[in-house]
């Protein structure tokens, strides 16, 4: 039986489509608007995400990487293009993390019809927000670290 909700904890978030691709803060840079990418898993702090649950099945994803005490969050990029990109921000943004079967989840941006998508297997490909189509590159496995 697939999990219905994630619990608070720290996770490596692995893409279902591409072998050895996890959500990563590019080059472990703490600056705001740093691209969030797919990268080979090396267990660094920039690949560890604290998941915090809020009422209404909403979550915030906070990187274990810090910048002099400033927290780093998984959020929409401030660069306004289509499709929207995902980048770090110094403020939390809420996401709906929803089960899609086989212990996989989609990371849904609740303010538009879009989910976190890794569009390519190439290392350092930035995550984007695209409409949900049920593709494997739109599904994620949350593994405790």
Image: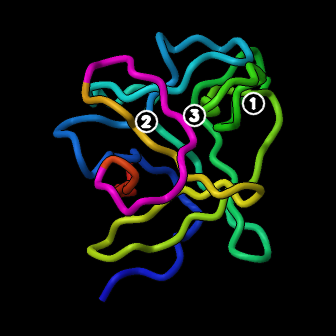
x 26%, y 74%: residue = 102
Where residue 70 appears, x then y in whole percent? Answer: 79, 24
CA neighbours of label 3 inside 10 A, class few (<14), some (14 to 19), many (20+): some
Read off the magenta span.
122-136
Asked whether 51 or 126 is in front, the reply is 126
Where residue 74 appears, x then y in whole percent? Answer: 64, 37
x 40%, y 52%: residue = 138
Q: Does residue 12 belong to the magenta stretch?
A: no
Instruction: Tell me the quarter of the picture where residue 38 sits.
Output: top left
Q: Distance of mark 1 from mark 2, alpha carbons?
A: 17 Å
Q: Quadrant of the N terminus?
A: bottom left
Give above or below for 35 relative to 132: above
The residue indicated by pointer 3 is 64
Left or right: 20 with respect to 45? left
Where residue 134 appears, x then y in whole percent? Answer: 37, 63
The residue indicated by pointer 2 is 23
Numbered mark located on residue 71 in the image: 1
Asked if marks 1 and 2 touch (Cβ < 8 Å), the reply is no
Where residue 47 appears, x then y in whole percent? Answer: 44, 32
Instruction: Tell me the quarter of the picture where residue 41 sits.
Output: top left
């Amino acid at each position: 039986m697939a999990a219905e909700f994630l619990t608070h904890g720290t996770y490596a978030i692995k893409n279902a489509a591409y072998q050895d691709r996890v959500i990563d803060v590019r080059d472990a840079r703490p600056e705001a608007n740093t691209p969030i990418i797919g990268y080979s898993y090396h267990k660094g702090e920039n690949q560890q995400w604290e998941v915090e649950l809020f009422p209404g099945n909403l979550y915030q994803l906070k990187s274990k990487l810090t910048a002099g005490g400033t927290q780093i969050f998984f959020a929409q990029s401030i660069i306004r293009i289509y499709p929207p990109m995902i980048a770090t921000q110094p403020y939390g943004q809420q996401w709906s993390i929803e089960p899609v079967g086989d212990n996989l989840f989609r990371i849904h941006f609740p303010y538009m019809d879009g989910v976190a998508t890794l569009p390519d297997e190439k290392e350092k490909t930035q995550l984007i927000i695209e409409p949900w189509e049920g593709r494997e590159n739109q599904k994620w496995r949350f593994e405790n670290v």
